[in-house]
Image (tube, rainbow, N blue to C red):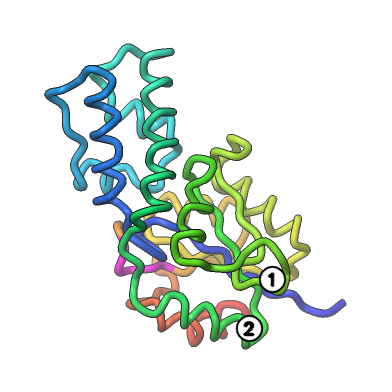
Amino acid sequence: MKEKKGIIFDMDGTVWDSSENVARSWTVKVKEAGFEDKVITQKDIQSVMGKPMDVIADTLFTYTKKGKQRNDLRKACENFENDYLREHGGILYPDVIETWEKLKAEGYHLYIVSNCQAGYVEAFLEYYKIPWGKPSCLIEDIECYGNNFLQKDENIKLLAERNKLTKACYVGDIQSDYDATAKAGFPFIHASYGFGKINVPVPEIKKFSDLPDVVKEVLA
């Protein structure tokens, strides 16, 4: 059987930083919900990026009642965030598109798995006009927590199996990305310019354009 090598990417802290615009969009909905003295800051968002949305809500919305009130606010923030990012985007790290195009030309298959809400990855892809969803596209497939409420390790395995990958690695920036990848049974590449550090030695990229050289070794 012909080898099919896949590279699966985290979103936040790996390919872009949307924290400033996420904070702005969430603050709008928090104030609309009646919490006029509350503000969601960029630092708040960066501190929880990579975690499932329900965990983020429990961390940031401690002034709400757990249950319907908190869930309703979380959903309002999620939906408005997607719309806001579709219009305003975030900060794309240097050379992401060019590096993806190079990797695609070298025969790698590219994917995204995130702990985000449904629609978030699509908002990113739409804003930057990145083709996705077919084998011929730059990003062939995506999966996220908001689609199926599975943990990241389960979604990494799900996507790898769904796309019949013979070899795969995950590229992420925080410890939980590494933990999920290890649990899923795949090698990990640390985006060391992102939001976190890893507590064991792993292959790393200091900038996104380092990836082609590192991947050659990891997926040899």
The amino acid pointed to by label 2 is: Ala
Answer with mark 1 or mark 2, whichever residue precedes in sequence.
1
The answer to whether residue 192 is magenta is yes
SS at mark 1 in the image:
strand
188 or 75, nearer to the observer: 75
Residue 139, horizontal then vertical, whole percent = 60, 67
**Mark count:** 2
What residue appears at the point 69 percent right and 71 percent down from the top-left corner? 167
Magenta stretch prevailing secondary structure: loop
Q: Which residue is tagged 1?
A: 167
Q: In the image, which residues are magenta? A: 190-194
> Is 218 situated left or right of 5 in this image?
left
The amino acid pointed to by label 1 is: Lys
> Relative to 27, does residue 120 appear above or below in the rendering?
below
State the separation of the CA atoms marked 1 and 2: 9 Å
Whether residue 22 appears in this view of the structure is: yes
What residue appears at the point 54 percent right and 86 percent down from the top-left corner? 102
Looking at the rendering, in which quadrant would you find the C terminus? bottom right
> Is 87 situated left or right of 161 in this image?
left
> Is 208 situated left or right of 23 in this image?
right
Whether residue 199 appears in this view of the structure is: no
**How crowded is the residue under tag 2: few (<14 C-alpha within 10 Å), some, or many (20+)?**
few
